[in-house]
Image (spheres, grey):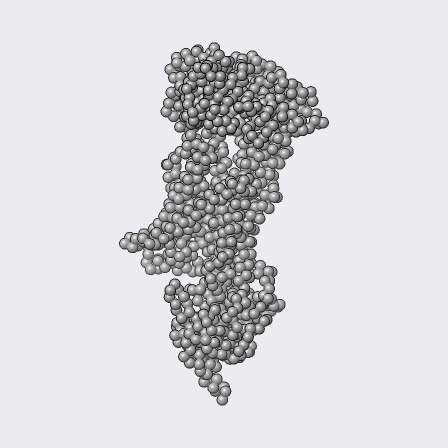
């Protein structure tokens, strides 16, 4: 589903060059649930951005669902994202001028699908917010906003879902509810999940943990959970 | 190894315009107040243009509708000299076709015995049934007919008011007394402005001889009005006789020619005013551009999310383009509605200049133009910030602090700059008529923009580089606001500066024109002119003048003559060959020539020598020509001119060219003969003197009129008063249009202060939270706005100074006069307004607790 090869990302600022990712390699199979962990500044968010086609690598390649992203224009990558990718952000990233329902509808509308309202309502129901469908993001709590964000992420039935610190802005209790919902929905839809976090507890709930530090992968291990399941 | 699947690499993502429109509408939620503020900045500019253009159509409509009453006849033939038998034969040949009225026009003194006062007027001695169309409007109404029945007169109503005259009172013109039959209110085709300059008095033509004013040398014009039968087409007739009219120095007017010349003249005025409106619109465009820029900055996050979810750059661009188009459409509609309402005021405003009553006429074309203009300018000026949407990186969703744009360099920006330039050029060409004028206007506007923008940038850089680190906190904070992110320096400098430049230019030009005349009246310059003094009256007039204690500053004899040949070139040859580029009038007009042996104070030698006396030795009389006149008739030193001095041919040679200061109150001449040639020719004299005060002038004028009714006197005070009235009326109209710019400037100011309000509020609240007092916040805000206001207004005034100087020197060809103190008033008012608006917008921060402000603004 996702193949990352010799991925390097260098930022240039005047004469200064800052390499934040250096020769990163890994492959994630369809249906896998994987966590990328590492301390702040280790390059994990950059890696997520590159893997999801939000940015271009300085060298190396990213192949997502069979599509090499490296040479695609930004608009073509946008198309790929709309067709195969879902996103969940730490700060929810809902569009403030749209209601909860409209936020969920956007990816479907972009695809030109029909009955988008019904589909979006079903997802809102699934995340328990059907009654709040006409509320704007500012009228929802953090947890509610992240649940809307989940509904939106799954609305286009993505092949792969990227989640960046999905519970980072939530209290423990709310965070747990969102985590549960995320894993449940992921399981129901059979989506590949790539989770970026520094929360090791959350990472332990995935099948595989890729540890990254100073821009390089320092370990790539299966979690106990996977081992137990495989046994 | 995986390969790109063709399905993925070449996605055919549809634009889905319907959905994009829906998204554009959805996205305006919670921003509509802001958007209304953006569009308000173009409303006034559009309103000004719609009002002026609607008025243009209304005026055209009125002129077409009431065309015949503009000249009161089917055909008017006129000439500025007494018609000879051949000229009369032409007039008579037309008379055979229909009815005719004759009119003599001359300037003379009108004496009011009751108030013992006199005033220079235009006397119109009328005979016949004129006007055949429209009416001479009088009070009482019947007076326009009954004054023709005896020694009766119609007197301009303003004059009657001024000299407290009433119908039934007696007046004197020349040697003849008349009874006022009624007040004269309107003459066909004449504007109120014309009657300010030359108030008219109608008398029956049969009594004009009795006035004794028809003397040789007097300035008399002869008009013949014709009422032609329907079978005769006046224009065809006019064209058929045109060459003969020219030959005899005659001119003609028909309803069509008058409509054309009048339409052209008012079109010029309307075009000029539309340009003033256009400046207001451009100012509003600056507001739109900056507002959209700030709006887009607020929208970066939303655009990033949409890009992340799969929206293409083009789609994101279109969402916001649709918003701007909608905003422009609404602004255009609002401007068109307001403009249509304002045009109802315009006939009243222009009343003084209009020859016909104009009823406001709703012009669909002007409204449609206004709406279209709203959309076009909004899109055009919003394009620069809109273009950046295409470059917004979806990565912004992950890292809000960096990577807003994928690529900062965008060649399309240059295309937009080009489009803006082209738009201003084409629009001003449409309003002004010639490419050269349009290019000058566009160049001027762009130069003003650039100067202000560069100064704003320079100011930011200077303050940043030489930041006074040792100054007090309030000063440092206030100064830092000039260059920190989200500063308003550029926007405020451009909008306030341009507004001030416009108002300052208008004011300076007006002052220059007026002071040009005032200066002429100062020091020892003449302020009283006596003309039409006959030879026999000359000595007596000199005696009276001296007896009154007045100096004889200048006394010139005047001999009238016509030009017959320039070298071998005759009038007929010039008429036949238009490539010569010499006006045929050169040979038909009457020249008023003087003779003297020295140059006057107003004259300077440009070329040649002026000996001043003719010794009779050479065949050719050496003469001096005014340099501009010589240029117009394509003559040089050494060329010969043949004059016809009332029947006697005199061959002359140009030996001297002079530069003449025409702006002085004194008699100046195109042609000067030497002494010793014209002394015996029929002539009259012009005398210049200077009275110490109005009373002395009035007493002197009374005595002259009483003793010599044919002599006309005119005082500088009257010229000044008349000019002041004319200039005031014109500048009132211009200032009315400039108001649109001022209010637009204010709206842009309010808008720009408002759009950056949230940023300022956050900072101020933080400062307050950290313990800054209300007084400190107030002082910081005050400092920022007073610095911006002062600098913008000062720059605007410097631009105004340059523009007014250029207009004075190149357009009006007068000496530029700089009156400094009113500029300080403008500077003070503009600065205070800026500070006022700035503080008013920030008052919320000062009066409320920090937390409340933060919650409310969030």
How many numbered badges does the structure rendering display? 0
Q: Is residue B107 visible?
A: no
Looking at the image, is A154 positioned above or below residue B427? below
Q: Residue at x 44, y 47 (%)?
A: B449
Q: Is residue B855 above or below residue B131?
A: below
Image location of residue A129, percent across then percent down: 53, 70
Judged from this view, the residue extending furthest toward the right is B231
Residue extending farthest front: B618
Q: Residue at x 47, y 55 (%)?
A: B293
Foreground residue among B93 and B505: B93
State the residue lying farthest toward the bottom. A231
The quarter holding residue B508 reads top left
What residue sits 42% from the left and 64% below the top? B401
Q: Depth check: give the residue in front, A108 or B60.
A: B60
**What residue is shown at x 65% (from left), y 20% (from top)?**
B90
Q: Is residue A85 visible?
A: yes
Front residue (pair B749, B570): B570
Image location of residue B657, percent across then percent down = 45, 25
Q: Position of residue B209 (x, y in %)?
A: 57, 13
Residue B163 in percent (x, y) is at 49, 21
In front: A13, or B492?
A: A13
Is residue B97 toward the left or the right of residue B207 in the image? Answer: right
Q: Is residue B663 above or below residue A139?
A: above
Specify the quadrant of the image occupied by residue B2: bottom right
């Amino acid at each position: 589903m996702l193949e990352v090869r010799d991925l390097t990302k260098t930022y240039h600022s005047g004469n200064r060059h800052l390499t934040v990712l250096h020769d990163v390699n890994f492959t994630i199979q369809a249906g896998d649930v994987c966590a990328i962990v590492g301390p702040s500044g280790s390059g994990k968010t950059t890696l997520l951005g590159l893997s999801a086609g939000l940015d271009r690598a300085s060298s190396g390649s990213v192949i997502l669902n069979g599509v090499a992203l490296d040479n695609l224009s930004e608009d073509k990558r946008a198309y790929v994202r709309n067709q195969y990718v879902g996103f969940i952000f730490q700060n929810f990233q809902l569009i403030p001028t749209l209601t909860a329902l409209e936020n969920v509808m956007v990816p479907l509308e972009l695809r030109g699908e029909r009955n988008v309202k019904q589909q979006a309502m079903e997802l809102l129901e699934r995340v328990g917010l059907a009654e709040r469908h006409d509320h704007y993001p500012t009228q929802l709590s953090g947890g509610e906003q992240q649940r809307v964000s989940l509904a939106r992420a799954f609305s286009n039935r993505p092949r792969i879902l990227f989640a960046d610190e999905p519970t980072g802005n939530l209290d423990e209790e709310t965070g747990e509810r969102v985590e549960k919902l995320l894993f449940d929905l992921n399981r129901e839809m059979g989506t590949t999940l790539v989770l970026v976090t520094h929360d090791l507890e959350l990472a332990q709930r995935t099948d595989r943990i890729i540890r990254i530090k100073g821009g390089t992968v320092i370990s790539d291990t299966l979690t106990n959970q996977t081992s137990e399941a495989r046994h | 190894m995986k390969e790109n699947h063709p399905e993925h690499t070449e996605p055919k993502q549809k634009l889905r315009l319907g959905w994009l429109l829906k998204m554009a509408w959805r996205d305006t939620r919670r921003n509509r107040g802001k958007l209304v503020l953006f569009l308000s900045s173009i409303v006034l500019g559009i309103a000004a243009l719609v009002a002026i253009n609607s008025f243009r159509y209304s005026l055209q409509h009125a002129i077409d509708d009431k065309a015949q009453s503009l000249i009161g006849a089917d055909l008017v033939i006129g000439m500025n000299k007494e018609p000879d038998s051949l000229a009369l034969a032409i007039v008579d040949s037309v008379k055979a076709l229909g009815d005719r009225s004759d009119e003599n026009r001359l300037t003379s003194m009108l004496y009011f015995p009751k108030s013992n006062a006199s005033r220079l007027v235009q006397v119109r001695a009328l005979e016949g049934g004129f006007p055949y169309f429209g009416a001479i409007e009088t009070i009482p109404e019947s007076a326009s007919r009954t004054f023709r029945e005896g020694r009766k007169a119609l007197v301009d109503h303003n004059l009657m008011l001024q000299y407290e005259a009433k119908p039934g009172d007696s007046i004197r013109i020349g040697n003849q007394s008349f009874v006022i039959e009624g007040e004269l209110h309107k003459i066909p085709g004449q504007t109120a402005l014309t009657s300010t300059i030359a108030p008219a008095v109608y008398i029956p033509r049969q009594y004009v001889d009795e006035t004794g004013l028809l003397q040789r040398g007097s300035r008399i014009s002869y008009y013949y009005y014709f009422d032609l039968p329907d079978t005769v087409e006046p224009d065809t007739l006019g064209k058929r006789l045109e060459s003969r009219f020219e030959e005899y120095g005659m001119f003609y007017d028909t309803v069509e020619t008058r409509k054309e010349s009048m339409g052209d003249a008012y079109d010029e005025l309307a075009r000029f005013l539309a340009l003033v409106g256009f400046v207001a619109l451009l100012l509003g465009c600056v507001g739109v551009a900056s507002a959209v820029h700030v709006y887009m900055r607020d929208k970066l996050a939303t655009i990033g999310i949409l890009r992340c979810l799969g929206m293409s750059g083009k789609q994101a661009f279109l969402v916001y383009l649709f918003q701007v188009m909608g905003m422009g459409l609404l602004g255009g509609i609002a401007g068109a509605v307001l403009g249509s309402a304002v045009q109802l005021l315009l006939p009243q405003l222009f009343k003084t200049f209009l020859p016909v009553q104009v009823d406001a006429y709703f012009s669909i074309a002007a409204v449609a133009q206004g709406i279209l203009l709203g959309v076009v300018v909004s899109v055009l000026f919003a394009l620069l910030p809109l273009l950046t949407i295409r470059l917004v990186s979806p990565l912004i969703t992950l890292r809000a602090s960096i990577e807003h744009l994928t690529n900062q360099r965008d060649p399309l920006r240059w295309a937009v700059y080009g489009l803006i330039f082209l738009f201003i050029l084409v629009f001003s060409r449409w309003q002004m008529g010639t490419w050269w004028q349009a290019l000058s206007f566009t160049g001027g506007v762009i130069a003003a923009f650039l100067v202000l923008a560069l100064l704003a940038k320079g100011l930011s850089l200077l303050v940043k580089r030489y930041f006074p680190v040792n100054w007090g906190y309030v000063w440092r904070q206030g100064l830092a606001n000039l260059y920190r992110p989200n500063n308003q320096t550029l926007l405020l400098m451009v909008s306030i500066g341009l507004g001030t430049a416009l108002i300052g230019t208008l004011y300076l030009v007006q002052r220059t024109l007026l002071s040009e005349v005032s200066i002429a009246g100062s020091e020892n310059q003449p302020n009283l002119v006596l003309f039409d003094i006959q030879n026999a009256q000359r000595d007596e007039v000199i005696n009276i003048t001296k007896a009154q204690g007045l100096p004889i500053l200048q006394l010139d004899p005047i001999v009238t003559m016509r030009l017959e040949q320039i070298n071998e070139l005759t009038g007929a040859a010039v008429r036949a060959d238009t490539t010569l580029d010499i006006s045929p009038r050169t040979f038909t007009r009457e020249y008023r020539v003087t003779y003297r042996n020295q140059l006057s104070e107003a004259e300077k030698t440009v070329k040649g020598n002026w000996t001043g006396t003719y010794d009779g030795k050479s065949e050719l009389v050496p003469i001096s020509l005014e340099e501009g006149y010589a240029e117009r008739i394509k003559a040089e030193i050494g060329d010969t001119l043949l004059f016809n001095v009332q029947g006697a041919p005199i061959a002359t040679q140009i030996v001297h060219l002079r530069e003449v200061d025409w702006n002085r109150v004194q008699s100046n001449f195109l042609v000067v003969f030497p002494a010793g040639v014209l002394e015996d020719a029929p002539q009259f004299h012009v005398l210049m003197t200077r009275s110490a005060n109005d009373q002395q002038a009035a007493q002197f004028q009374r005595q002259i009129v009483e003793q010599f009714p044919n002599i006309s006197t005119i005082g500088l005070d009257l010229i000044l008063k008349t000019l002041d009235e004319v200039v005031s009326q014109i500048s009132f109209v211009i200032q009315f249009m400039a108001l649109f710019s001022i209010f637009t400037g204010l709206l842009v100011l309010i808008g720009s202060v408002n759009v950056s309000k949230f940023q300022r509020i956050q900072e101020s609240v933080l400062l307050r939270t950290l313990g800054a007092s209300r007084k400190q916040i107030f002082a910081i805000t005050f400092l920022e706005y007073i610095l911006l206001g002062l600098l913008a207004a000062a720059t605007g005034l410097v631009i105004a100074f340059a523009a007014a100087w250029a207009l004075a020197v190149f357009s009006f060809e007068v000496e530029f006069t700089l009156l400094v103190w009113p500029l300080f008033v403008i500077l003070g008012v503009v600065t205070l307004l800026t500070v006022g608006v700035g503080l008013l917008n920030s008052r919320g921060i000062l009066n409320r607790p920090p937390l409340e402000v933060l919650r409310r603004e969030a």
